[in-house]
Structure formats: structure tokens, C-alpha cells
Image (cartoon, grey):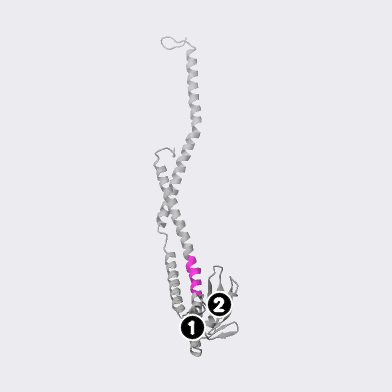
Amino acid sequence: KAVATGNPLIKEKMEIDNDVQRLKLLKASYDNQRYGLQDNFMIKYPKLIKTATEKLANVREDVKARDKELIDNPEFAITIGKATYTERVDGGTMMLEAISKCKTGETTAIGKFHGFELLVEKNFLGINYMVLRGKTEYKAELSTSPVGSMVKLENLFNGLHENIDFLEKKIEQYQNDLEASKAEYDKPFAYSKELEEKLSRQCELNAQLDLENAKAVDADLSGPEEEREADDRMESAAIVAEDKGAYPVDREGRTR
């Protein structure tokens, strides 16, 4: 029978089945990775590039507005509510007072600074941020002192241009990541030929083993018939022998 111990086809099929299973797992992993790579260069990175490019354009507009403002109004001045303060201590004190009245978990507008809207962001961790809003937003953590808060605010305002370099590098990084995802996506499955050959051989072995099993089944089913025929032959021989025993014979073999 095909399942008999020592059948080389059975041994080969077991090895082929293991190889096919291993290669199919590798192929599934390859396919899953390709789905992620395709998402990267078709959705993820194009979206990131678009967002960063739009923000970069806004930052450049804000830098132009800042530069013009510093030429037109170079002196320190901050508006909190409806009042404008030209001293840093006064401005910082009133800003911290206004912030203390803002709700936690919200971003609240409290004034203006050199033409930019000034907001405060309070979170449930007890960390507060000042936010400058022009075409886009810029954020820095607040100080607990009035003067310290004003220094941080001015540094935030004066450093708007630093966002240009940051965003340009981000866009370049996203573009490189997009191209890398494309290149990786285009790579073929490294074991494609081997898997194809193993699957073909697996089909051949299955066909051969099915044929051998079918022959074995036929042999099993024909067994009882052959046994009956043998029994019939034995029974006929016994009858003949019995008939001969009923008539005595002489020395020359003739019946009497």
C-alpha cells in the first residue's frame, strides 16, 4: 500500500509538504509587508508631504510678517485682553493672571503679540503652553515667572524661521521614505521560483499516491472474491475425491 513504511514517495511528500508550508508563510509575510509599503507610498507619505509643504508655506508667510513687524514696531509690547503693556514684568504678570482664569483642557485666546494671536493651552498634567498663531501655530512651554514667560515668548517669536529648516528636512525625509517604500514594494518574492517548483512536485506526488492508494483499495475489495473462488475450487476437489472413494478399484485402477 502507498502508506506502507519505507515508501520513498511518502517520505518525499512529507518533506515537500513542510517546504511548501514554510514557503507559503514567507509569501504571506511578504504580501503583508507589501500592503504596508503600498499604503506608505500611496497614502501615508504623500499626506505627510502635503501637510508639511502647506505648513512650510504658512511659516514662510509668518516669517515675512514677523520681519516686517520688527521693522515697523521694534519695541516690546504685548496685549492681554484689551490692555497693552510695554514692560515685560507688567505684561508677564497680566498674562499669568489671565492664564490662571483659563479652563484646563482648552486652548484659550488671551491677547496679541506683534500682530500674532496669543493663546494659552492648559492640560490636565499641569503643564501650560503659550501659543502664537499666524498662518500656522507655534508653541512653547510657559515659565512660572512673569519675566521668564516674556523671554520665552520673545524667543518663540524670534525663532519662527527655524521651523523652515525643520520642515524642509522633514519633507526631504518623507520623500526619501516614500521612494524607499516604492523600491522595496517592487522587489519580487525571493523564493517565488522555489515555491512554484515545490507546489508542482507536490501535485505530482499527490497524484502518484492517489493512484497507488486506489490500486490498494481495489486489491482489498477483490480479496473476498478470490477467497470464495479458492473455497469453491477446494470444495469441488473434495467432492471429486469423495466420489472416487465410493467405488472400489482393482489393481489396474478400474472400478468394480
What stretch of residues is rendered in magenta? Answer: 38-51
- For mark 1, give the secondary structure: helix
Nearest to the observer: residue 105 or residue 45:
105
Q: Is residue 98 above or below residue 17?
A: below
Mark number, residue 96: 2
> Does the image show residue 134?
no
Q: Is residue 159 magenta?
A: no
Per the picture, the main secondary structure of the magenta-coloured stretch is helix
Q: How many marks?
A: 2
Q: Tell me where residue 52 appears, x and y as whole percent.
A: 49, 75
Left or right, 190 with reference to 87: left
Q: Tell me where residue 71 appears, x and y as whole percent.
A: 48, 89
Q: Tell me where residue 215 appears, x and y as whole percent.
A: 46, 38
Q: Is residue 28 above or below residue 155?
A: above
Q: Is residue 3 above or below residue 80?
A: above
Q: Which residue is mark 1?
A: 63
Q: Is residue 43 magenta?
A: yes
Amino acid identity at mark 1:
Val
Residue plotted at (48% across, 22% down): 234
Residue plotted at (56% across, 74% down): 121
Q: Residues within 10 Å of mark 2 (few under 14, many from 20)?
A: some
Residue plotted at (42% across, 65% down): 184
In three-dimensional space, the C-alpha distance between marks 2 and 1, rounded to whole angstroms, equals: 27 Å
Q: Residues within 10 Å of mark 1 (few under 14, many from 20)?
A: many
Disc nearer the start of the sequence (2/1): 1
